[in-house]
Image (cartoon, grey):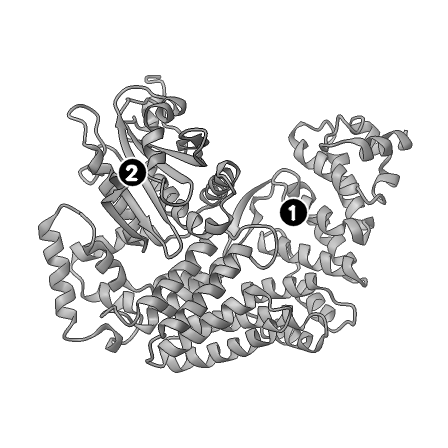
Amino acid sequence: MTQTVLDALYAMDVPSVEALGGEEVIYASQSDLVADPLVGEVALALCAEWEHLRAPDKATTFLLDAAAHVTPFAAKDLFATILNSEDALPAVAPAFEDVLRTRASGRGPVRDFALEAWTHLLLGGWARRKNALFAALEDGAGTDDATPALVRALGQALTWSQEDDLQRALTTLLTHDELDGDASMELGIYAVAQAVRCDAVDEVRAHLGAAREHFHVATRDEQRPDAVAFDAVIGGVLDQTAGHTVPPEEYERIAHSVYAYLDGYAGVQVAARAQTTVAWMDLLGDLRDADVDHWYTPARTISSLGRALAAEKTFVVVVRADEHHGIRELVRPHVESIVGRNADAITHLRRWLGTDDGDPRLHETVEQFLHEWEAEPPKDVGGPLAMAVRDHAPAEVQDVLDRFKGLHIPLSYVEEQLVTRLVADSDTHTEGGVGPFRTELTVLFHALVRFASRSLDRAQTSKRSPKWFASKAPWPEEAVLADAINDALMGGGLDSTVEDENAGGRGDIRIRFARCRFAIEVKRTVRLRDDERLITDYGAQAVQYASTDVPVAILAVADYHRRKVRLDLPATFHTVPYQLDPTSRQTALTTLRVQANVATPSASSAKGL
């Protein structure tokens, strides 16, 4: 029987319990399977079908036995499979921590993989022995066979806990010939985190100076692009906080470093998270605009730097909802909430003045408020700028700030996954792929997903409902939705305009980046049209507006066909290949359906007792 299941293990393409011969066959061959290099495939099959297993208690025993005996070759993947299972992790977590603690007391790569997994278990709220973990991490740093997995674990634990002992443990690895670059990156990022927590510019500069020294060391490690980008950006931030502007040639060098990092993302074949890309691009914008923006303050760049750091250190874990349930979420470092409280409110207000809100009186109120502040420049106001603005701003101005704050809240896990899907689908359908402009496309999809998500949350019948919502004729013109999307893009810091000359006509929205441009065509429909019909009716026009730039087109449609049940967020986006004629490029066309006439969720329930 054992040979049969091993043969099946090595022959199957997609891991499944059935392909392995069923549960009983797996459990009967446990002693042989847990020592096999492909045991992770068996674990993947069990975890994927956990809710349908007949004997989850036996599956729990199998996973724990596998974790206790897994080889160095398979340990990382096995631990990750267990940690990423929302169904299996709650069942195995208490005993899994004990297994990891035992494996962490050994030597070699398995010890460090176990420490990294144990750290993730702690960040998800499953681990009970934090002090034992931290002691094991410190002991690991003193060994002569430490690996990059240990450095990652130390960095994650340090970011989460801010423990001085963990910082000292990482510092000892600076003398390690093969790990000094990794340790320097973690220590540099931690120094940035300390900088953005400070209120005094002198303290900020001291921490940033320490960070740059670490990044200098890390750049010697085969010129790793993440270190080069951080090193270049920190140099620009140090210049600004010293009262200097960043010269154009220096800005170009910094921008080139950041693009090289985001395009290649640390030299591995995966794209940066959407929030990571957006945070870095915001930071570049601050470095560029400081010398032309009357309201620029060093606090703004420092806040953007903090957001970039927070995005870098955010990752997905299965978080403990209760004793029996886990949920996959993005875990962010504490620094992000601090940066959020110190956001530059003046920047939000100035961006809002550039939008078409349609309320002249409110525009006048905001303009008057900013004019009054000119007598006392923001950089001379003590304390976090956002707090100072809120202390003095009238209620209407505070309302504007609240709306713009929503544009800068980090994406949820579902929103992040949607952005990743849209970029991947565009890459599949775009002739030549999106590699040369992946960074900019990610920023744009980030803004559109945020707009779509917020729109789904908005009430459609309140006094403050968006002007493009309607439940009966006369239906709002397409320009109303176009202006709303454009305002959201501008509020998010993008260079966005409406009614721009394009492809012999006037495109509804044009978004400009340094390396490329994108166009959004806006339409409306009052009758039922599925995604295929929308593309048939409007796709050619939308794609033509991409004729002179990258082969990506976006079609946004205000859907006024009455819906009793709303589509969820992922279902509102649809990407397909589109070719205008056989000699033209293949373009990736993404449709965004904005549901503008939909009943409340409660309306779908039966009425009466």
In the rendered image, which residue does mark 1 sit on?
A: 83
**Can you give x and y, in whole percent of width and height, for residue 223 in the image?**
60, 69
Residue in the image at 25% along x and 33% along y: 460
Q: Quadrant of residue 336?
A: bottom left
Dot 1 falls on a residue whose secondary structure is helix
Q: Earlier in the sequence, mark 2 or mark 1?
A: 1
Q: Compare residues 435 and 187 and report the one nearer the observer.
A: 435
Give the spatial CA distance, label 2 vs label 1: 35 Å
**Can you give x and y, in whole percent of width and height, for residue 31 in the image?**
88, 40
- Residue 300, compared with residue 207, is above or below; it is above
Residue 339 appears in the figure: no
Label pair 2/1, CB-CB below 8 angstroms: no
Is 265 situated left or right of 595 in this image?
Answer: right
Dot 2 falls on a residue whose secondary structure is loop
Q: Quadrant of residue 566?
A: top left
Residue in the image at 67% along x and 41% along y: 91
In the rendered image, which residue does mark 2 sit on?
A: 458
Residue type indicated by callout 2: Arg
Q: Quadrant of residue 401?
A: bottom left
